[in-house]
Every structure is written in C-alpha cells, then in structure tokens.
C-alpha cells in the first residue's frame, strides 16, 4: 500500500469480475472460495482460479484477499484446516476471517499471512479493536453500525489498519448476523446461504382464513417491512479520507461485472478528485449521477452520518431503481467495420443511444444506427448471447461496458 493513499477494495464473484474490478481501478479485490465464506450460493473461486486471480491482480499492481468468514462448526474443523494448507500454495495477500477459531487456525497453519477481521466480528469500539490487533490482526473492518464520531476515535487509537464499508447493501441485522433466512427458508446467512428474506414482499394473513391475504399498502409493489436502503458514502468520502482510514470497501460479491465496474470507477474517480483537491459539489454530483446508472435501491448515508433514524426506518420505495439497462461487454475489435464486437447481455434495438464506459475514462455516447452480426448482416435488434458489431464506433478499451437508458 502507498503511504497516504487509501486502498479501494472491490468485490469479485468470479475470475472475470476480478479482472473488471482491477481494470476499473481497484487497488485490491476480495473473493471467496467454494466454501467457508458468506457468499457461497453462486460463483466463487476454485483453487486454480484463485491462483490465476492472484497472479493477474499482482501483474496489475493490485492485491487479492480471500474471505473465510463464515461461522465454523465442529464438523468443519478438519476440512477447513486442509483447505488452509492448500491456500498456502497460492500467493494471496490476506485472509478475511470472523470466527476466532478460524483466526487461531490460520495463525497456526500459515503464520506469515495477513489476517483481516470481517465486519461479521462487529468491531464497534477501540477496546475490541485493540484486542484483535494484540491477537495478531493486521486489519479490522469496522462495523457499519457505528457513528462517524466513533470512527474518529477508533481510527485515532488503532495501531493497525482500518477498513470501512462505503457502498452497497445494508442488512436489518447487526453487521449481517441474521437468522431470518434460516428460519424462513432453511438457508443460513451466517454460512453464506442467505435467501434475502428481508427483501421479500409481505402480506397480512387472517389466522382462520389461511388463503386470504391482506396487503398492507405502502407502495404499489406491496410492503417491504424489513427492507433497507443501499449505503452510499461517496458524498462524505473526503471526511473518511481525512481520518487516515486505510481501506474503503465496496459490498457486492453477488453483483455483475457492470455493477462492480461502475461503482469501482466512481469511487476511484472520487479518490482521485480528493487527491487533486477537486472533490467539490459539482464533481460529487457527477459521480452520483454515474452511480445512478447501475441498479440500486435508494441510497442512504447509513448509521455513520445520519443524526436520526428516519431514513433507515422509512421503508417506502426501497425496491431496485433501474434507470439503465446493461446491454453488453467488449469482446474485441472488428477492423473490417471499424467497430467493437459486443457480447450481448440484454436486448437492444437499432437506433438507441448507447452509453459506453471504459476503464479510467469518462462515459461517451454513441447512436447505434447499425447493428451487424459476425457475418456483416444488418440486424434490427441484438439479443442476449449474440455477438454483434457496432460499425463506425472505432476501437475501445478492453473491459468496456455498454448501457442504454431503460424505457
């Protein structure tokens, strides 16, 4: 890490997204293996993919952290010990843990690896932080439920690194320690299998009439009694920077390459604006407008900066906002037609205005007056999994993404 510079830490659910995150400006990426992490339902990395991901990140000057932050039960001990021994052969930069037993096991098997404390540990004060630093932790992710004033005090007293979540989904439970999913769906959130029961639509049912449902009207879509907004601390990033926090973290290991790219790009630009003394209202507004282009719930400043709880308790209109549709990724350049080859994610039609984001550049607009298939045949629309050419657009950077305004 560069002294005086905050690390930007981005999520990755697979090797492809890791590469997007690094190319869009992440200083480090955190990922999970196939077990023992809190996002274990879809995706994640095999040992070979972790090896390739670490190599790719290091070549780009970035780091890779592995999450081993699920709750450990007695029957898991032998398997996780064997897994840690296999991880020793991979050049990852740190392991993220929450269970004290896993913490001790990693220190015993792999004493040289850096240990980062997960938000699941619920570190909310300087005494707890000191305990973990004394035990050998290199970094602590501070609980999202603390105030900014408490963050100041913890940061001032911390002899080790401090990491703060600045963007992404929030949970109704303390730092994610929730049993709702396990009770309602048999999927334990503390083992990485959350069914997101708090996001479901709920109705009132009369006891003696089991098939008679009464909607509790709050929005046209129903009532979301547990649903929280999405955290977005970008407008307050300079305050966090001034504290000397070591790392800012983006939530989203279940998100697409579009989401990870856009959010990583926005926070990279925000940090650059801070270093350049250009973090003003105009540039903050510009970056928030770009964040608005990926799917999200209404934003909140969360516990850290809200003086009251009204915004956290107001669950109206907390469904996903989808102002733009992610339509594809850059797959290469076709010289014959002077345009990019795009792998289509969602349908788009000829004549639409496409919003293009490239790593380390501002977005540009292009009107798709023609869409061609690989043989040069003109198409009226492009459909998912098609590979199409936008003639005349020219060559774009690798890892470019394409969006259109939603109808």
Image (cartoon, helix red, strand yellow):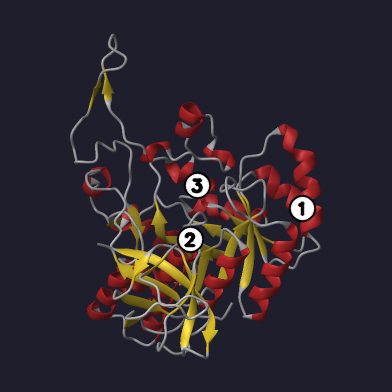
Question: Which x, y percent locates residue 403?
Answer: 36, 70
Q: Which residue is mark 1?
A: 84
Which disc number belongs to residue 256? 2
Relative to 67, does residue 207 appear above or below in the rendering?
above
Residue 236 visible from this viewpoint: no
Q: Nearer the viewer, mark 2 or mark 1?
A: 2
State the residue at coordinates (57%, 55%): 130
Real-space Cα distance between discs 2 and 1?
28 Å
Structural crowding at the residue carrying mark 2, measured as other residues with C-alpha within 10 Å and reported as few (<14), some (14–19) or many (≥20): some
Q: Dot 2: what SS?
A: loop
Q: Quadrant of the N terminus?
A: bottom right
Q: Earlier in the sequence, mark 2 or mark 1?
A: 1
Q: Which residue is mark 3?
A: 122
Which disc number belongs to residue 295? none
Q: Dot 1: what SS?
A: helix
State the residue at coordinates (57%, 47%): 38
Real-space Cα distance between discs 3 and 2?
27 Å
Q: Quadrant of the C terminus?
A: bottom left
Q: Nearer the viewer, mark 1 or mark 3?
A: 1
């Amino acid at each position: 890490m560069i002294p005086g510079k905050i690390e930007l830490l981005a999520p990755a659910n697979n090797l492809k997204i890791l590469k997007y995150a690094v190319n869009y400006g992440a200083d480090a990426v955190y990922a999970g293996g196939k077990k023992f992490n809190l996002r274990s339902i879809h995706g994640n990395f095999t040992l070979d993919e972790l090896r390739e991901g670490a190599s790719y990140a290091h070549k780009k000057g970035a780091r890779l952290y592995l999450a081993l932050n699920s709750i450990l039960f007695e029957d898991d001990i032998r398997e996780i010990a064997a897994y840690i021994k296999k991880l020793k052969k991979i050049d990852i930069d740190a392991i993220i843990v929450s269970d004290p037993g896993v913490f001790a096991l990693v220190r015993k098997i792999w004493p040289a690896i850096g240990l980062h404390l997960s938000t699941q540990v619920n570190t909310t004060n300087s005494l707890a932080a000191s305990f973990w630093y004394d035990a050998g932790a290199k970094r602590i992710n501070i609980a999202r439920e603390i105030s900014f004033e408490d963050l100041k005090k913890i940061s001032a007293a911390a002899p080790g690194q401090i990491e703060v979540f600045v963007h992404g989904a929030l949970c109704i439970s303390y730092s994610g320690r929730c049993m709702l999913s396990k009770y309602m769906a048999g999927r334990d959130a503390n083992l990485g299998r959350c069914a997101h029961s708090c996001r479901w639509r709920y109705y009132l049912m009369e006891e003696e009439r089991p098939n008679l449902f009464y909607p509790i009207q709050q929005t046209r879509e129903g009532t979301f009694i547990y649903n929280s907004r999405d955290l977005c601390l970008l407008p307050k990033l300079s305050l966090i920077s001034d504290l000397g926090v070591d790392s800012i973290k983006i939530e989203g290991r279940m998100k697409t390459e579009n989401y990870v790219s856009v959010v990583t790009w926005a926070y990279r630009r925000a940090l650059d604006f801070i270093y350049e003394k250009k973090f003003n209202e105009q540039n903050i507004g510009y970056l928030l407008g770009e964040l608005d282009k990926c799917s999200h719930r209404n934003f909140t400043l969360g516990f850290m900066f809200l003086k009251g709880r009204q915004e956290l308790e107001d669950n109206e209109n907390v469904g996903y906002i989808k102002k733009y549709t992610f339509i594809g990724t850059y797959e290469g350049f076709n010289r014959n037609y002077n345009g990019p080859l795009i792998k289509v994610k969602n349908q788009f039609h000829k004549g639409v205005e496409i919003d293009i984001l490239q790593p380390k550049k501002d977005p540009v607009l292009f009107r798709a007056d023609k869409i061609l298939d690989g043989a040069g045949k003109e198409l009226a629309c492009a459909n998912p999994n098609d590979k199409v050419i936008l003639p005349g657009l020219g060559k774009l950077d690798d890892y470019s993404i394409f969006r259109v305004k939603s109808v």
